[in-house]
């Protein structure tokens, strides 16, 4: 049950994607680059559901990703597959390594605080480290973190409890490459709930 009376943001955010390779394997770099493309459209419902669309990804890249807050599950659609890949967001196999603050950056005309969270998948061989950095505004758009209190995957509940806003910049460092998502447009609007419905074949 929510205790905050502030209205949670609903609308569309558009990001430009910048890919930075850290590997000398050109085929690997090109695959990772095409997996994301250069644009992300993020649709967020006030009830917590969200949808990520990758309109410029390659033929073997991401098509879209839907999170259902009601089910606490996510579904990923690849362009070259007809079926959806489901994820149980109540589970998290990662271990938290550290949390740090980053200097303020001006992004899309707003002063944004920085928050960096480092995690490791100890089941991997070798263990896979992921570093996620979020830049978020204060006293602008608000997201109610209680919506995501059970979204444990990738510590999303911890992240949203910290930032309580749509991120204006997100940097994913996977060691062999880095992906940056930077806001270019944000529009507050009522969304069609049909875009968050899951159709599993």
Image (cartoon, rainbow, N blue to C red):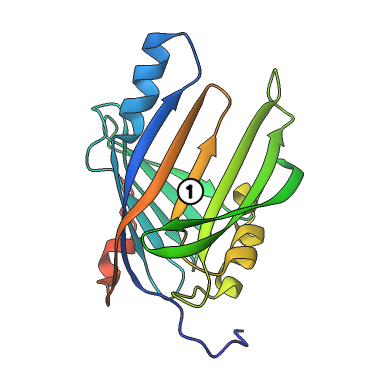
Q: Which residue is mark 1?
A: 170
In-front residue for pair 57/26: 26
Please say if 162 is above or below 114. Answer: below
In-front residue for pair 83/56: 56
Q: Quadrant of residue 180?
A: top left
Residue name at image x 51 percent, y 61 percent: 112
Q: Secondary structure at mark 1?
A: strand
Position of the C terminus, as image quadrant, is top left
Q: Locate residue 14, reporting x and y percent.
A: 29, 55
- Residue 20 seen in the current view: yes
- Residue 93 seen in the current view: no
Q: Locate residue 32, reporting x and y percent.
A: 39, 25
In-front residue for pair 186/103: 103
Q: Locate residue 88, reporting x and y percent.
A: 56, 50
Residue name at image x 54 percent, y 76 percent: 144
Position of the N terminus, as image quadrant, is bottom right
């Amino acid at each position: 049950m929510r205790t905050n009376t502030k209205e949670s943001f609903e609308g569309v955010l558009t990001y430009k994607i910048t890919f930075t390779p850290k590997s000398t394997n050109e085929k690997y770099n090109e695959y990772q680059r095409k997996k994301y493309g250069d644009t992300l459209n993020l649709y967020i419902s006030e009830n917590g559901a969200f949808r990520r669309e990758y309109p410029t990804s390659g033929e073997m890249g991401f098509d879209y990703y839907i999170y259902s807050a009601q089910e606490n599950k996510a579904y990923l659609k690849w362009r070259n597959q007809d079926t959806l890949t489901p994820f149980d967001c109540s589970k998290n196999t990662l271990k938290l390594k550290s949390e740090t603050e980053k200097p303020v950056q001006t992004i899309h005309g707003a002063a944004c605080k920085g928050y960096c969270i480092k995690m490791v998948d100890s089941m991997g061989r070798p263990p896979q480290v992921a570093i996620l950095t979020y830049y978020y505004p204060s006293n602008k758009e608000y997201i109610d973190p209680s919506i995501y209190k059970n979204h444990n995957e990738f510590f999303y509940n911890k992240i949203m409890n910290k930032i309580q806003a749509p991120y204006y910049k997100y940097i994913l460092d996977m060691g062999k490459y880095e992906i940056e998502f930077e806001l270019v447009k944000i529009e507050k609007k009522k969304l069609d709930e049909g875009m968050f419905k899951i159709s599993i074949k």
